Amino acid sequence: MSDSASQRLNLIHNHLNNNNMTKSSMSVFQDVAQAPPDPIFNLTAQYKADTFDKKINVGVGAFRTDELKPYILPVVKKAKVILHENEALDHEYLPIAGNPSYTKAAAKLILGADSPAMKEGRFAAVQTLSGTGANHTGALFLSKFYTKSKKCYISNPTWANHRSIFSLVGFDVQEYPYWQPETRGLDYERLLQCMREAEEGSIFVLHACAHNPTGVDPTRDQWKAIAQVMREKNHLPFFDCAYQGFASGDLDKDAWAVRYFVEQGFELFVCQSFAKNFGLYGERTGNLTLVTKTPADAQRVLSQIEKLQRAEISNPPAFGSRIVDIVLNDPSLYQEWKDNLKYMSSRIIEMRHALQQHLIDLQTPGTWDHITNQIGMFSFTGLKQPQVKVLREKYHIYMTDNGRISMAGVSSKNVAYLAKSIDDVVRNVPV
Ligand code: LMR
């Protein structure tokens, strides 16, 4: 080849290479927009990065001791020893729907041993990746097999993940009124009105107890009226129960609404999380129970859910469910668990009183009764976003933008600082 011919060939090669380079340097993902940080978990990251000594994390709902340390329930410690010493256990796969002794115990816990649905065998249960997984699995099943409506109602305000979970599987997600700012309580009449006006057969996501984020629950009479309207409109109740036993300290009391709906003959879904009441946050231990008209309905639904579960996670993780299984199926450990629950719920209630008392003593403008009237992990303070921002930037106190405080992040040591900071923003930050 002549010099000029080989030069031309080189030029062609370079040209082709450059073109390829240009092409390959552009990602096929270049149009993917940056997603906003998670409104709850990002607070933990910000809190951890903060070096101020009086910083407070009242963002994520995770129980802390009065020393603000994560709490491993004593009964969980015992169950771990039992688990460790059990030579018969191995690391084989669990069944797709989880271990029946676990799912049945979880269903019994929420429905109650005397539940007509349990006695008649018209229920089924599947182990899920905590409460979020239960919500997702239930939502996914409904998106494929529930034909009455594509509308799903979540509360306003809402736990942010409910919207994401139900939108992800294609539901038209609407909100029902829940919080009334004037009374700092339930927007009862408007909630009922919304249910009456909703399309027949809509799905309503209901918080079984300790509503997240408000800490406001309907009274029993209000639940009865809600059930009546839902029956008239053939709405489908989809309960989310993340705080059974943690809310009031009483497992039966916290399950009352779900059990009432079952007694009234509803078909329903109920999601359970063992994150808070067992302190098994990272173990992703949950359960989805469904109640139907007949045992055969329940088994057919379960078979489809198993098919979905197989495609998504194959089969659920073993560790957390084994702990829960051991405790729920052993009478003396079960009793001990109830004592552990009492300790956690009492500490939260104590901190509610302490925060309220400090605000009263400081004569902070406004009323603060709602702090002790609300129940569960959270207090919906009524603080507005500009005040929340100042609390974060000036006082290093991390709470969600909607003014929700995780009471578990309040302790006898930081409550005075928290109250004084709230007092300042209530007086001085215009909203
Ligand atoms: C919360 O609301 O802070 C917790 O339930 C954690 C979560 O998953 O959002």
Image (spheres, rainbow, N blue to C red):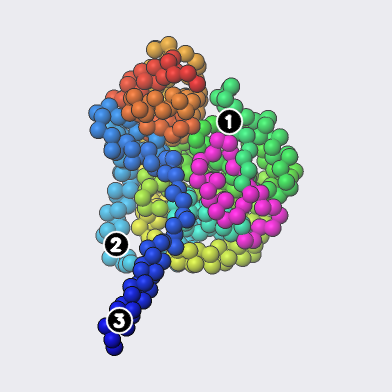
Ligand 1 is found in the corner quadrant, namely top left
Q: Nearer the viewer, mark 2 or mark 1?
A: 1
- State which quadrant residue 220 falls in: top right
Q: Name the residue under label 2.
A: 86
Task: Tell me if 48 is positioned left or right of 363 in this view.
Answer: left
Say which quadrant the N terminus sits in: bottom left
The residue where tag 1 is placed is 179
Q: Name the residue under label 3.
A: 4
Residue shown at 66% from the left, 34% from the top? 191
For the residues marked 2 and 3, what is the alpha-carbon distance in whole angstroms? 80 Å
Q: Do the residues labelled 3 and 1 touch (CB within 8 Å)?
A: no
Asked if residue 392 shows in the view, the reply is: yes
x%, y% of residue 209?
53, 38
Residue 326 vertical position relative to residue 407 in the rendered view, above or below: below
Confirm whether residue 262 shows in the render: no
Q: Position of residue 121 (x, y in %)?
A: 60, 59
Give the residue drawn at x 48%, y 26%. Answer: 384
Magenta span: 144-172
